[in-house]
């Protein structure tokens, strides 16, 4: 069994070596992304492993011609794969699970950083302004936090938050019976109008529709704090900018943004940012932006590589 892994980062190389030995399979790797130019590198392999590069129908067709029997993405989200094309071509594909603590702890960190105005504190410290002007924060303990989506990550966020003693509400079309014993599930609109902090833990909607737009922002509490470690497409960014400028949103922390693929994981130092909406969001003192790094822990990376290899073996077999 031979797997070809694309977009392999330096922090994954050693793990691919370790887990290919552990599972007794051959894994060849490249740091290049999968596309029509690099597709033929996968010739002679039965499965491929990718990360977030879009894989469309044309590319899938090429992989099919090359005899690829399984496509694994080393991510939880899989909206970058054209699922309809993969199904019609008969290429099974799958995502991986990894430690939910990576994203959950990061989301809680962003809540604390937003409530305690850390962006302002860091900016002031940098210019030796050690006054207490504009740094009054809010205690997480006193807040009502709304968790949108109670899959593995949302549930882990809740378990961490329970230690802070804050009030917690959740929304999910499929409430978790265990969780229902300790927290209140409410419709999204109720959560938005009742919570001081709102954190998103749902996948991108298949049709690309925003979960939060103008109406949803209007229905929030004044000064609400919004955390997004899920997907940029969940939020209408124009509406978010209006809500930040009007004060409706008191603070936001975004690990994901719309159009991030043009920016993230590139070194854009000394270059004009090719995204004016992003540059505006970046300029707000109460908006923290991080470059889709919530997942990035040693444990999560190890899980991503190991589980990608395991799912390839499960689907193709070792022989
Ligand atoms: C995912 O696993 O879905 C992520 O968002 C992390 C990915 C960017 C590596």
Image (cartoon, rainbow, N blue to C red):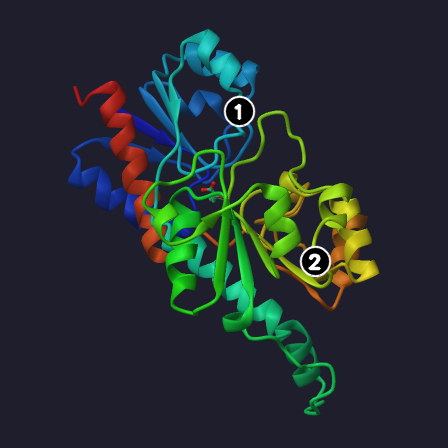
**Tag of residue 55:** 1
- Residue marked by disc 2: 221
Query: Residue at position x 79%, y 45% from top?
Result: 238
Percent x, y of residue 6: 43, 34
Q: Is residue 192 left or right of residue 244?
A: left
Percent x, y of residue 96: 36, 36
Q: Is residue 56 left or right of residue 247?
A: left
Q: Is residue 10 above or below residue 22?
A: below
Percent x, y of residue 138: 60, 75
**Disc 2 vs disc 1: Cβ atoms closer than 8 Å?**
no
Percent x, y of residue 151: 41, 42
**Tag of residue 64:** none
**Is the residue marked 2 within 8 Å of ligand 1, measured from its CB?**
no
Which one is closest to the eye, mark 2 or mark 1? 2
Q: Is residue 274 visible?
A: no
Q: Nearer the viewer, residue 189 or 106?
A: 189
Q: Is residue 166 above or below residue 66?
A: below
User: Which of the image's four quarters has the N terminus?
Assistant: top left
Query: Residue at position x 74%, y 51% from top?
Result: 278
């Amino acid at each position: 069994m031979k797997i070809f892994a694309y977009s392999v980062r330096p922090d994954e190389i050693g793990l691919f070596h370790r887990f290919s030995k552990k599972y007794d399979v051959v894994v060849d790797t490249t740091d290049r992304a999968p596309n029509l130019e690099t597709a033929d590198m996968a010739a002679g392999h039965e499965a491929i492993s990718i990360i977030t590069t879009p894989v469309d129908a044309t590319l899938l067709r090429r992989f099919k011609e090359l005899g690829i029997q399984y496509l694994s993405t080393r991510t939880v989200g899989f909206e970058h794969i054209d699922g309809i094309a993969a199904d019609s071509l008969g290429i099974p594909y799958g995502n991986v699970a990894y430690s939910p603590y990576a994203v959950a702890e990061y989301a809680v960190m962003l809540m604390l950083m937003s409530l305690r105005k850390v962006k302002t504190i860091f900016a002031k410290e940098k210019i030796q302004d050690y006054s207490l002007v504009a740094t009054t924060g809010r205690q997480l303990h006193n807040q009502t936090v709304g968790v949108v989506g109670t899959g593995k990550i949302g549930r882990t966020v809740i378990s961490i938050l329970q230690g802070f003693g804050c009030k917690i509400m959740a929304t999910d079309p499929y409430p978790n019976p265990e969780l229902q014993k300790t927290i209140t599930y409410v419709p999204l609109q109720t959560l938005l109008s009742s919570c001081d902090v709102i954190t998103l833990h749902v996948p991108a909607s298949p049709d690309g529709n925003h979960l939060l737009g103008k109406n949803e922002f209007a229905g929030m509490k004044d000064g609400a704090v919004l955390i997004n470690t899920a997907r940029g497409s969940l939020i209408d960014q124009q509406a978010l900018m209006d809500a930040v400028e009007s004060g409706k949103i008191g603070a936001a922390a975004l690990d994901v943004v719309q159009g991030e693929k043009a920016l993230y994981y590139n070194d854009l130092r000394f270059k004009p940012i090719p995204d004016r909406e992003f540059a505006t969001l970046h300029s707000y003192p109460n908006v923290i932006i991080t470059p889709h790094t919530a997942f990035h822990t040693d444990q999560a990376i190890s899980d991503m590589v190991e589980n990608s290899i395991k799912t390839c073996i499960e689907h193709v077999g070792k022989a």
